[in-house]
Image: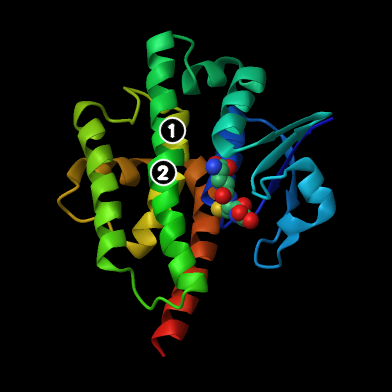
Amino acid sequence: MPVIIYKMNASPPARAVLATAEVLGLEIETREVSIPNKEQFKPEYLEKNPLHTVPLLEDGNFILADSHAIIIYLASKYGGDKGASLYPSDIQQRSIIHQRLFLDASILFPRLIAIIKAIAYENAASVDEKKTADVEEAYGFLEKYLESSPFLAGEQLTLADISCVTTVSSLNVVVPIDAKFIKLQEWVNNLKSQSWYVNKNEPGLNDLGGFLNFFLKKNAA
Ligand SMILES: N[C@@H](CCC(=O)N[C@@H](CS)C(=O)NCC(=O)O)C(=O)O
C-alpha cells in the first residue's frame, strides 16, 4: 500500500514533502486538503491530525504530522542510497541537518506565516517594517551558513535544503531577497534549476504568490 500524503500545493511544508518523495524516487498517493475551505477542520481529518495542518503522512496505520518529521521518516524508511545522501547517517552531519530543519520550523516558517496571516486575515496591503526586518534577519542567518558551504548542511543536497528552500522561496514573494545576500541568491538559483524544485516547488509557489498578490491588491484598493 503506498504512502498517502495529505497536502495543499501552496503550503511550503507540503511542498517539502512532495519534493523529498520525488528526489527519493518514491511513489506516493496524495489527497487534497483545501485550507481556504477549512477542510483541515473536518472531524475525520482532525481524528488523524489534531493539529489541523498539512502535510500529513499516512503509511498503513502509521500517521505522522509535520513536514520535518515526515521527510526524515521518508528518507530513513524508504530512501535507500538516495535517502543516505539526503540524510546521511554520520551523527554530526545529521545533527547539522536537524538544526537547519528546526531553524525552518521555529524561525523561517513562523515569520512567513505571520506575513501571510496579516495579508489574508488582517487586511495588510504591504509587509510592515518589523516583519520585513525579521525576514531580513533570517536571510542573514542562512547567508552566514552558506558562506562556508554551497548547501545548508555541507557539500551536498540534504533534507535541510529541500525544507528551507520551500519556505525561503515563499518568503521571497513578499520580502525579495536583497542582492547583498549573495550566497543565499546563489543557493536559491542553484536549487531552482533542479527538477524536483521545478516539479514540486514551483507550481505551489505560484499558487501562493497568486493568492498573496490577490489579497495585497484587494487590501490596497
Ligand atoms: N510545522 C508544520 C507546519 C504545518 C502548517 O502550519 N501548515 C499550514 C499550511 S502552510 C496549515 O496546515 N495550516 C492550516 C491550519 O493551521 O489550520 C510542518 O512543517 O508541517
Q: Hey, which quadrant is residue 94 in on the image? A: top left
Q: Amino acid at mark 1?
A: Phe
Instruction: Indicate the position of residue 212 as horizontal and vertical percent values.
Output: 47, 70
Going 20% across and 35% down the picture, which residue do you hit?
144
Which of the pair 23/165 is nearer the observer? 165
x then y, percent, for residue 62: 78, 28
What x and y, as percent, mark residue 115? 41, 62
Q: Residue at x 62, y 34 (%)?
A: 21
Foreground residue, 215 or 28?
215
Per the rendering, the mark at residue 145 is none
Tag nearer the camera, 2 or 1: 1
- Looking at the image, is mark 2 or mark 1 earlier in the sequence? 1
Q: Any atom of ligand 1 within 8 Å of the CB at mark 1?
A: no
Q: What residue is pinned by disc 1?
A: 102
Which residue lies at the image location 47% right of the left edge and 84% below the top edge?
Answer: 218
Q: Is residue 188 left or right of residue 217?
A: left
Q: Amino acid at mark 2?
A: Val
Residue at which label 2 appears: 165
Q: Position of residue 152 (x, y in %)?
A: 33, 31
Residue drawn at (30%, 40%), measured in percent from left and top?
A: 187
Secondary structure of the residue carrying tag 2 is helix
Please state which of residues 142 and 2 is positioned toward the viewer in this rendering.
142
Whether residue 185 is visible here, answered yes or no, is: no
Q: How many marks?
A: 2
Would you say residue 179 is visible in this rendering? yes
Q: Tell whether circle 2 marks a residue whose Cβ is less than 8 angstroms from ligand 1.
A: no
Would you call the spot at circle 2 few (<14 residues within 10 Å), some (14-19), or many (20 or more)? many
- Above or below, comparing residue 58 to residue 91 in the picture: below
Q: Is residue 135 above or below residue 216?
A: above
Image side of residue 182 versus residue 5, left or right = left
Task: Label 1: state its secondary structure.
Answer: helix
